[in-house]
Image (spheres, grey):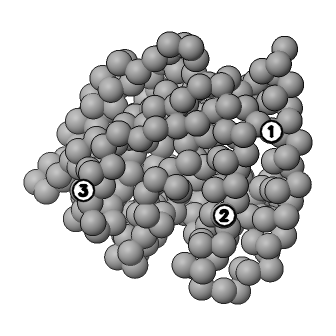
Amino acid sequence: MLTRLRSWLFYLGLAPLTVLFSLIGIAILPLPRTLRYAVITRWSVVTIWWLRVSCGLGYVVEGREHIPASPGVIVCKHQSAWETITLQLIFPRQCQVLKRELLRVPFFGWGLASLNPIAIDRKAGARALKTVLARGVERIRDGWWVLLFPEGTRVPAGTRGRYTSTGAALAIEAGCPLVPVAHNAGVFWARNAVTKHPGTIRVVIGPPIETTGKSAKAVIREAEEWIEATCARLPLQPGA
């Protein structure tokens, strides 16, 4: 009962914070991308701080030394909304590949638009891939990381979705490494669940995967094997 009450307390604080930053996001849309990003990611900083204070949920990161000095492509396990927020605090400035419907969500989507995302129509097939490749290469050359969730949708902790090779194709097109990320956020913050369990989420950043001379399928297969093997050794219970 206490855990659920603390979770509702988190949302009570998150709601006005999100409204405030969404309005700020609209106001600063004419400003340069880098400045908008610096302002709007303060929402992520405060949100993760408030999550720790209200719900007792923090995180630790292993493998920061694996983050290259130059921008590349991040492919991450997708279990909850948590990693979409927290990766902004772990990696340098980045843009996410996301479904364009998210930009229409009142308040949240308005602020999201200021974060320089690559919004796609997932039903568009090959056209969506071309959009990711064209805009993704442009972002990387401009000094931005590109974050993709190759499973496409959130999956419960301990399970595996179907990995798509879009992120690998982008890394090959841009001539940059692909960095895999594993975590167990879904154990504490599950999909569509109000309850946020106290504890410590573990994030593990893997060694960069070189893409030169490889096919997109081979690169994403290597990333998938590392991510799933790493996730398998992370706790699947909040108190573990």
Question: Which is nearer the eye, 103 or 90?
Answer: 90
Estimate how packed mark 2 is, as few (under 14), some (14 to 19) or many (20 or more) residues with alpha carbons within 10 Å.
Answer: some
Please provide percent x and percent y for residue 108.
Answer: 77, 55
Vertical comparison of 123 with 2: above or below = below
Query: Seen in the image, is 117 located left or right of residue 129?
Result: right
**Residue at (46, 32) in percent of width and height:** 202
Q: Are marks 3 and 1 in contact (CB under 8 Å)?
A: no
| Three-letter code for the amino acid on which mark 2 is drawn | Arg
Please provide percent x and percent y for residue 28.
Answer: 74, 81
| Three-letter code for the amino acid on which mark 1 is drawn | Phe
Q: Are marks 2 and 3 in contact (CB under 8 Å)?
A: no
Please provide percent x and percent y for residue 21.
Answer: 78, 65
- Dividing the picture into quadrants, the one containing residue 61 is top left
Estimate how packed mark 1 is, as few (under 14), some (14 to 19) or many (20 or more) residues with alpha carbons within 10 Å.
Answer: many
Query: Which residue position is annotated with label 2?
Result: 42
Estimate how packed mark 3 is, as few (under 14), some (14 to 19) or many (20 or more) residues with alpha carbons within 10 Å.
Answer: many
Query: Which residue position is annotated with label 3?
Result: 177
